[in-house]
Image (cartoon, helix red, strand yellow):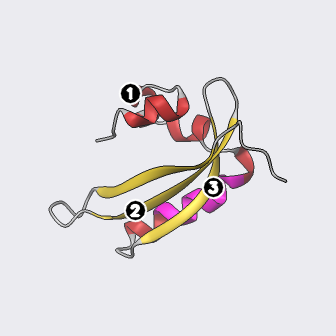
Amino acid sequence: WISGYITELTGYSKEECLDKEGWNNLIHPDDRSKAMDHLKKAQSGRSSCESFRCLTKSREEILITDYAKLSDENPDQIRGSITLTRSPETTDS
């Protein structure tokens, strides 16, 4: 399950994000290993919180923070939340 918020955040549909290549398209190439480590940590039963860059469908870079953990109800599923940390309009000063 994935929230419709992902579409608002990234421009990708829920179906595109759940597709095998969805996360590969979404995660910035330089941050894929960090994102995979985050996922593996959650899959191992430990809670994980990590920030990494994503690319919107229009190829704008955004920074998100993702919190993930195994579901208490179904240990084969990961539950979590994603928040936008930095939008494309934000500039570093």
Q: How many marks?
A: 3
Cβ atoms at labels 1 and 3 below 8 Å apart: no
- Eyeballing the image, is 63 above or below 10? below
Mark 3 neighbour density, 10 Å: few (under 14) some (14–19) many (20 or more): some
Q: Disc 3 marks which residue?
A: 52
Q: Position of residue 5 (x, y in %)?
A: 40, 36
Q: CA distance from mark 2 to mark 1?
A: 20 Å
Would residue 30 appear left or right of 67 to someone viewing this image?
A: right
Q: Nearer the viewer, mark 2 or mark 1?
A: 2
Q: Which mark is residue 68?
A: 2
Q: Position of residue 82 (x, y in %)?
A: 45, 51
Whichever of callouts 2 and 3 sits on the residue coming sooner in the sequence is 3
Q: CA distance from mark 2 to mark 3?
A: 13 Å
Q: Disc 1 marks which residue?
A: 15
Q: Secondary structure at mark 3?
A: strand
Extent of the magenta region: 31-39
Whichever of callouts 2 and 1 sits on the residue coming sooner in the sequence is 1
Q: Is 34 within the magenta?
A: yes
Q: Amino acid at mark 3?
A: Phe
Q: Position of residue 31 (x, y in %)?
A: 68, 54
Q: Amino acid at mark 2?
A: Ala
Q: Secondary structure at mark 1?
A: helix
Cβ atoms at labels 2 and 3 below 8 Å apart: no
Task: Give the residue at x 39% y 54%.
Answer: 81
Task: Give the residue at x 78% y 45%.
Answer: 91
Task: Give the residue at x 53% y 25%.
Answer: 11
Answer with the quarter of the image where residue 77 lies: bottom left
The N terminus - image quarter? top left
